[in-house]
Image (cartoon, rainbow, N blue to C red):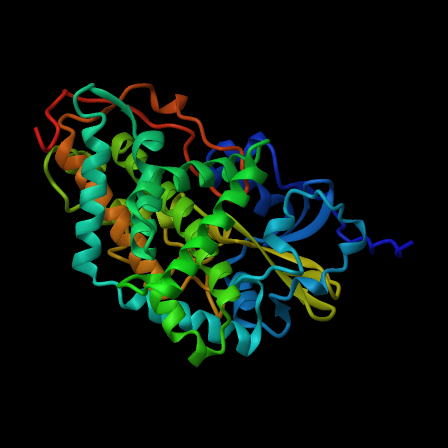
Amino acid sequence: MPEPAPELSYGPAPVPLFGARFRGEPASLYRELRREHGEVVPVLLDGDVPAWLVLGYRELHQVTSDPELFSRDSARWNQWPRIPADWPLLPVISPEQPSVLGTVGERHRQRAALIEEALEAVEPLELRGHVERFADELIDGVCGVGAADLVGQFAAPLPVRVLAHLFGFREEHGPGLVAALNDILDGQDRAMAAEGYLRTAMARLVAERRQQPGDDVVSRLLANARAYEVTVEEVTHDVMVMLAVGHQPTADWIGNSLRLMLTDQRFAASLFGGRSSVAEAMNEVLWEDTPIQNMAGRWTARDTRLGGRVLRAGDLVILGLQGANSDPRVRTHGSALTGGNNAHFSFGHGDHRCPFPAQETAEVIARTGIEVVLDRLPDLDLAIPPTSLTRRASPWLRGLVELPVRFTPGPARGA
C-alpha cells in the first residue's frame, strides 16, 4: 500500500474552495478570506484535499516569477497518494497532462513559442470580420423576438464558433463543438462523452490539415512543429487546450462585461449607440470580476515561506487571480477604471501566462461581440432584477448562468 500523504500544517481551520459562496460577489469573499487568514489562505479542494490559495498581489507575483521554487510540475505533489482515480480536478492537474499546460522549462518555452507564432499570423481586421459575421448570425436568431438570454444564446456560442473557424474546422462543426464544451463545463454525465467527441474532432482536423494545409492556425502549427521539436500528437493536444481555454473565459468576459454595462449607470451611454465605454467596462471586469478567478497551480520544489506561512515541499499552490487583483495594498481607492491599466493578473504572469497573441484574440472576440450586441439590439435592458442574476458555483471560472434581456424587436440583418 502507498504511504499516506503528509498533512499540511495550517494553523487556522482551512476554507473549502467550493460551494455556493462562490456565487456571490468576489470582493466581499476575498476580503473575508484575507481578513481571517492573510495573503496565503489554507484551503480544501473537493474531497478535502489540502492546498494553499495565494491572495496577495506581491505574493502571487513572487510565485509566478520563480518557476524553480514554485514549479508547474504536478508530479511533485505530496498529496498524490490520497487522490482517487475519479477525482474531479484530475483533468486539470494530472501528472500526465500531455498538453502545453503540463510542460516545464525549455520544453514549455518551445511549445508556447510555436503557439504564439501560429496565433500572431491571425490578421486583426480579418478576425474582427469573422466575429462580426458570427455575432450577426446569433443576433439574427433572437432580434425578432424582443427577448433573449445573452449568455446561452450569444456569449457562450460566439467564442468557440470564431475559434473553430480560425483553427480550420468546417462551419458545420461549430454547433457540435459548442455543445461538447458546454457539456464538459457542466461536469455532469455527458462530460466524458463530450471530451471524447472533442478528442476525435481534433484528431480528425489535424489529420485533414496534414493532408491539405490551409490558411489556419492548425496548419501553421503543423508547418512549424518540426522547427520547435513538437510532435503531431503534441499539436493535437495543444489545439484542444487552446479551444477549451480560449472559449469559456472569453464567453464569461463577454457576459460579465454586458452585465456590468446593464447594471452600472456609468455605462448607460454605451447602451444607446456609443462605444467609448466598452473597453473600459471590459477592463473593469478583468480587475473586479475576472472570468478566471483561481488557477491550479504550482507545486513547491522545497520547503519555503510565503506570506508568513510555512509551505512544505510538494504543497499545491492555487493562484488567486481575483484575490490578487483586489489586494488593497496595491489598489487605489474607488473604481478600477484606470485608463487602460493592465497590471491585473487576469491573464496570469511569468512563463506560464496566457500568450499575448491569445490575449489579443480574446479581446477582439469579446469587444467586437459586445459592440454587435449594442448596435443590433435597441433599448437593451435586463429582463430581471440585477439581484436575481445567478453565477456558477465555481471557484475557478466566474460567469453568469444566464443574462435575460428584453429589447424592441427588429429585423434580421439579411431581411
Identify whether 23 is placed above or below 237: above
Residue 72 visible in this rendered orientation of the protein: yes
Classify residue 408 as left or right of residue 335. Answer: left
Tally the numbered discs: 0
Q: Quadrant of residue 259?
A: top left
Q: Quadrant of residue 379?
A: top left
Q: Quadrant of residue 141?
A: top left
Residue 222 in the image, given as x and y percentages of width and height = 40, 69
At horizontal 27% and vertical 24% (from top left) the residue drawn is: 148
Classify residue 410 as left or right of residue 348. Answer: left
Could you tell me which quadrant the N terminus lies in?
bottom right
Classify residue 56 as left or right of residue 282. Answer: right
Residue 408 in the image, given as x and y percentages of width and height = 14, 20
Identify whether 60 is placed above or below 268: below
Residue toward you, 303 or 67: 67
At horizontal 42% and vertical 52% (from top left) the residue drawn is: 243
Classify residue 29 as left or right of residue 127. Answer: right
Identify whether 176 is placed above or below 355: above
Identify whether 11 is placed above or below 394: below
At horizontal 54% and vertical 61% (from top left) the residue drawn is: 99
Could you tell me which quadrant the C terminus lies in?
top left
Which residue is the extreme one toward the front? 211
Which residue is the extreme one toward the bottom? 227
Residue 290 visible in this rendered orientation of the protein: no
Residue toward you, 190 or 282: 190
Residue 398 in the image, given as x and y percentages of width and height = 46, 40
Residue toward you, 345 or 143: 143
Which residue is the extreme one toward the right? 1
Which residue is the extreme one toward the left? 415
Residue 209 in the image, given as x and y percentages of width and height = 37, 62
